[in-house]
């Protein structure tokens, strides 16, 4: 099969990829870019572990072809942090113990971020409704909802990743 070139911005950096016509965005992110925060969960769009942002909207990368990202802005969990500064929602997940095994966490944070961008002070019902397509096998979702609702109290400078 002949590969084609697809160009999109990934976590703020313009990138170019050679892809098969049927190659998934998830595979490009994980295999070509080695950004393993985006998880392969169910492969059929039901768990949300592969959620990324495409042009500011949550997208299940296991269902989106890489060629469909042509010209788009794609952000993964790795792209939410600004340098060493975690996104406030990432910090809130840590402080609220909303991370169990961690497999679903990137998708939870990515979908939670889209809610907070639309509504910085959601109620628990709003959080649960917005995140209904994100599955977690380890928790009862209470700490996840608490983390999303509490993210507004943080600034990105509140938590720095270790220096490289």
Image (cartoon, grey):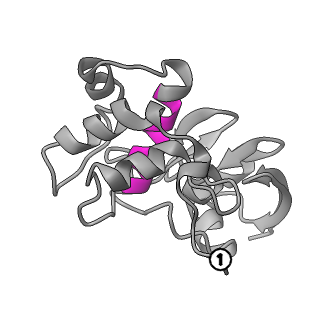
Where is mark 1, residue-wise? Answer: 163
- Residue 44 can be seen, yes or no: no
The residues colored magenta run 105-115
The N terminus: image quadrant:
bottom right
- Outermost residue toward the front? 158
Above or below: residue 117 compared with residue 143: above
- Outermost residue toward the left? 140
- Residue 14 can be seen, yes or no: yes
Magenta stretch mostly in which secondary structure?
helix
Kindly identify the residue that appears in the image at 54 percent across and 40 percent down. 59
On the rendered structure, is 67 left or right of 132? Answer: right
Q: Nearer the viewer, residue 19 or 151?
A: 151
Q: Is residue 111 magenta?
A: yes
Q: Give the image quarter of residue 131.
A: top left
Coordinates of residue 3 in the picture (x, y in percent): 80, 67
On the rendered structure, is 55 left or right of 57? Answer: right
Q: Nearer the viewer, residue 24 or 35?
A: 35
Q: Give the image quarter of residue 41.
A: bottom left
Kindly identify the residue that appears in the image at 29 percent across and 23 percent down. 129
Q: Nearer the viewer, residue 39 or 12?
A: 12
On the rendered structure, is 163 left or right of 10? Answer: left
Crowding at mark 1 (Cα within 10 Å: few <14, some 14-19, many 20+): few
Kindly identify the residue that appears in the image at 68 percent across and 53 percent down. 82
Coordinates of residue 87 in the picture (x, y in percent): 56, 47
**In terms of secondary structure, where does tag 1 sit?**
loop
Q: Give the image quarter of residue 42.
A: bottom left
The C terminus: image quadrant:
bottom right
Q: Is residue 132 magenta?
A: no
Coordinates of residue 115 in the picture (x, y in percent): 46, 27
């Amino acid at each position: 099969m002949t590969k084609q070139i697809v160009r999109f911005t990934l976590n703020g950096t313009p990138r170019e990829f050679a892809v098969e016509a049927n190659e998934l965005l998830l595979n490009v992110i994980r295999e070509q870019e080695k950004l393993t925060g985006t998880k392969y969960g169910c492969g059929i769009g039901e768990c949300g572990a592969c959620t990324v942002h495409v042009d500011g909207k949550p997208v299940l990368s296991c269902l989106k072809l890489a060629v469909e990202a042509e010209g788009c802005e794609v952000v993964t969990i790795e792209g939410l942090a600004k340098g060493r500064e975690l996104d406030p929602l990432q910090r809130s997940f840590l402080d609220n113990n909303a991370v169990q095994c961690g497999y679903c966490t990137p998708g939870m944070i990515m979908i939670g971020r889209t809610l907070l961008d639309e509504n910085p002070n959601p109620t628990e019902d709003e959080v649960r409704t917005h995140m209904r397509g994100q599955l977690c096998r380890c928790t009862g979702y209470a700490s996840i909802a608490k983390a999303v609702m509490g993210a507004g109290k943080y600034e990105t400078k509140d938590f720095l990743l270790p220096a490289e």
